[in-house]
Amino acid sequence: MNTNETQVIAPNAYRLLWAGFTAILAAGVGFAIRGGILNNWRDEFGFSFTELGAIGGAGLTGFCFGIFIGGVVVDKIGYGKLVIAAFVFHIASALVALMPGTGMDKATVFAYLYWGTFLFAVANGTLEAVANPLVATLFPTKRTHFLNILHASWPAGLVLGSALGWVLDDMYNISWKYQLALFLIPTVVYGLMFLGQSFPRSEASEKGLSFGEMFRDVGILGGAVACFLLSLFFAGVFGSFNLSDDVARNLGYGIGGILLIAVAVITRFSIGSWLLFVLFVTHALVGAVELGTDGWIQNIIGNILTSGEGKILFVYTSMIMFLLRFCADFIERKIGLSPIGILLVCSILGCVGLNLASGIQSFEGALLALGVYAVGKTFFWPTMLAVVSDRFPRTGAIAISVMGGIGMMSAGLIGSAGLGYSKDHYAAEALQESHPEIYEKLKAEEPSKFLTLQTYGIDGDKVKDYAKIPPEERSESDKELLEAVAEAGITGDRKTLVADSFIPATMAVIYLCLFFYFKAIGGYKTVHLAGTQAEEIDENDEVIPAHEK
């Protein structure tokens, strides 16, 4: 058999693929538009940056709930029911988020926008819990290729949403409500594409494996990764109620510990697969360096160059990702890289690209540096999902969904938060070294915190007070202060990018070890459960009994 031939297990496989593509496209469009109208909400309703950050944070927590819960139940209730649930969540999110109007008090408006964003994210997470295992099931011989195609829709949605926001908001000042409602167009399209379709069953579901059996490869090791991140999440939730750091942290760890005990009981105290544990940890790094960096890259590059150039470069890197994600099959067949080989090369490029970006002096230099970084990050997320699907078919949709949730939580709790902390730390450090007297004048009263670290950054409100002084009324000391802060900010951004590059460097070491591991056991192969349709399709790959430990 020619294993390069595309094999599908359902006659409507391509329709389901493009339906999933359109669904994630809707998520990308909505995500980009919401990011673009934050300033509209600030101007219209008077929200602080902290309040806007809380609304945006709902877009991460909601996603995690959607993908975790959806991934756990999808093999038991079927893909179709979850598609309906996601569609309903998307429509409900629009209805809730579009409720604010003139005359409403600020707290009510905040509640509508917060829960509207949360429901939108739940819908997105639920769709990922459907689309990822669905495509992995439909195309068992080319999972890397088709999962990359599926996830090309995310950067496509970012580009489309950013372009729509630039035209409708910046050029024509169209109401934010009309902008926000635009994601409903691809939402209706994916609903129609999924309507009336039959869905295949995963290998694990086809063999009738129990929930506990599907969870055994995840086990205590894999569960520990997810539960640790959930502990950080719940610690943040409790911290928002003005509890002390120690109390909030202990409560978070308590919930994480209870969840881990539940995983242990469900799996009959299975330790789990060490390989899956390593992949989960690595995907936490993927979320931090890909999505976490994406959340800050416009700000960082816009600070080093200009705000407009930062936006252009964000669209540029998203376009590179969109186009290259259609090339994974070519890379595997023509260049001969296995999925692990692709990930190794990408991590090296990601590290090089971030270091190059830290030293940019011009827009042309940024094109080169961020182009290298974009190529590097292109294949991380979908290829990691493909590796888990290839090697752990017994887990059904559970492992692939837990991995997605780990990546998203890491992006918000470690990647985005860690980069923000680094910016505070390095900017303050630079200002303290160059102008210690200015630093003492602008030093924040409360420290910036990240995990167990803390630093006293520069108080943004104090800087704003000086920036509000009309240029013609500024004294020489005022000008010197603002120039010193700007220079320190740029220095801090450059050092932050260098620090960020250690994440893909660490990933490169892990992938290199995995490369040699697979080489030692005869090469990277797709694993199938004995007696499934997938085994019959690709009989040359590795086959294991469905109930083998």
Image: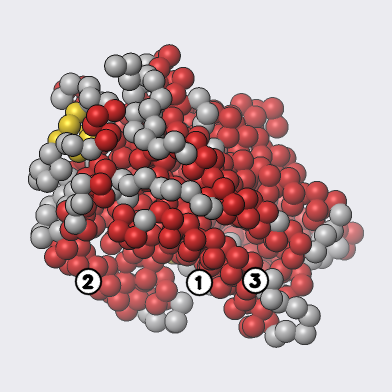
Q: Which of the image's four quarters has the C terminus? A: top left
Q: Distance between the residues labelled 3 and 1?
A: 39 Å
Neighbor class of circle 1 (other Cα within 10 Å; few <14, some 14-19, many 20+) is: few
Residue 205 placement, left or right of 40:
left
Q: What element carries label 2?
A: helix
What amino acid type is highlighted by mark number 3? Answer: Leu
The answer to whether marks 3 and 1 mark residues whose Cβ atoms lie closer than 8 Å is no
In the rendering, which numbered label is found on residue 446?
Answer: 1
Q: Name the residue under label 3.
A: 95
Query: In front: 137, or 521?
Result: 137
The reply to whether residue 188 is in sight is: yes
Q: Is mark 1 on a helix, strand or loop?
A: loop
What residue is rendered at 62% in x and 73% in y? 96
User: Reading the chain from its start, which is encountered first: label 1 or label 2?
Assistant: 2
In percent of width and height, residue 335 lies at: 41, 15
In percent of width and height, residue 307 lies at: 72, 47
The picture quadrant where one finds residue 511 is: top left
In percent of width and height, residue 547 lies at: 12, 46
What amino acid type is highlighted by mark number 2? Answer: Ile
Neighbor class of circle 3 (other Cα within 10 Å; few <14, some 14-19, many 20+) is: few
Query: In front: 526, or 205?
Result: 205
In percent of width and height, residue 196 lies at: 51, 52
Q: How far apart are marks 1 and 2 (CA)?
A: 33 Å
Q: Distance between the residues labelled 2 and 3?
A: 36 Å
What amino acid type is highlighted by mark number 1? Answer: Glu
What residue is rendered at 40% in x and 54% in y? 79
What residue is rendered at 24% in x and 68% in y? 259
What residue is rendered at 61% in x and 55% in y? 187
Q: Name the residue under label 2.
A: 258
Query: In front: 423, or 145?
Result: 145
User: Reading the chain from its start, which is encountered first: label 2 or label 3?
Assistant: 3
